[in-house]
Amino acid sequence: MGKIDVSIILVNYNGLNVLRDCLDSIFRHSAGFTFEVIVVDNDSNDGSVEYLSQRKDIIFVEAGENLGFGRGNNLGFRYSHGEYLFLLNTDTILRNNAIKMFLDRYDTFENVGCVGCYLKDLDGNTCMSYGRFTSVSYEFKKGIATYFKRLGFSSNPGVDLIDGREVDYVIGADIFMRRDIALQLGLFDSRYFMYGEESDMQRRYRINGYRHFVICGPDIVHLEGAGNGVSMKRKMLAEAGKFLYIRIWDGNFKYIIFRIGYFFLKFPVIFDMKYTIKERWHYLLWLVSGSR
């Protein structure tokens, strides 16, 4: 096997409707470097396995169970050979030679860990691409600000597209990094199922001296939740990751305080009519017990 510059790792779970376009965009727009595409399937039942098993241009890995996002990427990493890794969501579409741009820019940064770009939605608007490391106080401030926004007392000022912006973490939809960092410090903590693992990983990298950036240039569309809002299942998965993150990084005492405060902060959700009565009941039980 010759030298491989980039291992592109995707984790799929019943995502055939978007996976085809994602893979096609990778092969259509990637040039000027060597790469391999590794797709881990988390026991899909939508025809993904049959489709992936027929493709000869990818490395297809059947997980045999739903490992979640982090463990799925960890499994894909074990099959990779590239000097660099590009962890990419299946619900993305590359619209230019984005991976080559990451490759060319990566080593221009000092003490670089993870690099991402300013993702776009289908309408070309910049969508969530990076975030701050969370904490108990930050989550409460963010939650209160959300209520003010709903009441019309605040607005989203938008994002300044600063090239080379240093951030706390790049979201998991498009993470470009060196292989040796993953070998040194590992990829995702296997305790996370989905959500929170990219922030946890990059915080671990940060305390070991690595810095994270987002750049202009790569043109990647992220389809997550387009037009559908946030489902209750997705909401609870995100909060489960948040709870685990707080417990790991802030300790049990702050975690307990956080859970109590979070109950009162999120209790109004059970009156949100966009969710069914069953969903709202399950969410109430979730707020009380943490069991989905």
Image (spheres, rainbow, N blue to C red):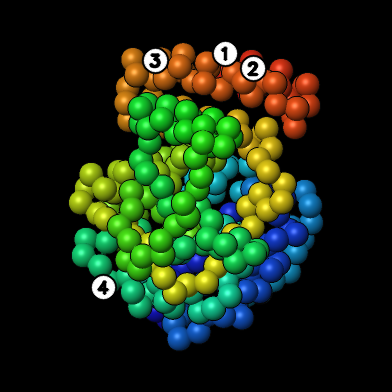
CA gap between label 2 and label 4 equals 48 Å
Residue position marked by numbered label 2 in the rendering: 284
Residue position marked by numbered label 1 in the rendering: 288
Point out the tag, 4 or 3, that comes first from the N-terminus: 4
Residue position marked by numbered label 4 in the rendering: 108
Q: Residues within 10 Å of mark 4 (few under 14, many from 20)?
A: few
Q: Residue at x 71, y 51 (%)?
A: 227
CA gap between label 1 and label 2 equals 6 Å
Residue type beneath disc 1: Val
Q: Residue at x 37, y 26 (%)?
A: 136
Residue type beneath disc 2: Leu
CA gap between label 4 and label 3 equals 42 Å
- Identify the image quadrant of the C terminus: top right
Residue position marked by numbered label 3 in the rendering: 257
Q: Residue at x 70, y 61 (%)?
A: 18
Q: Where 2 sits versus 88, above or below?
A: below
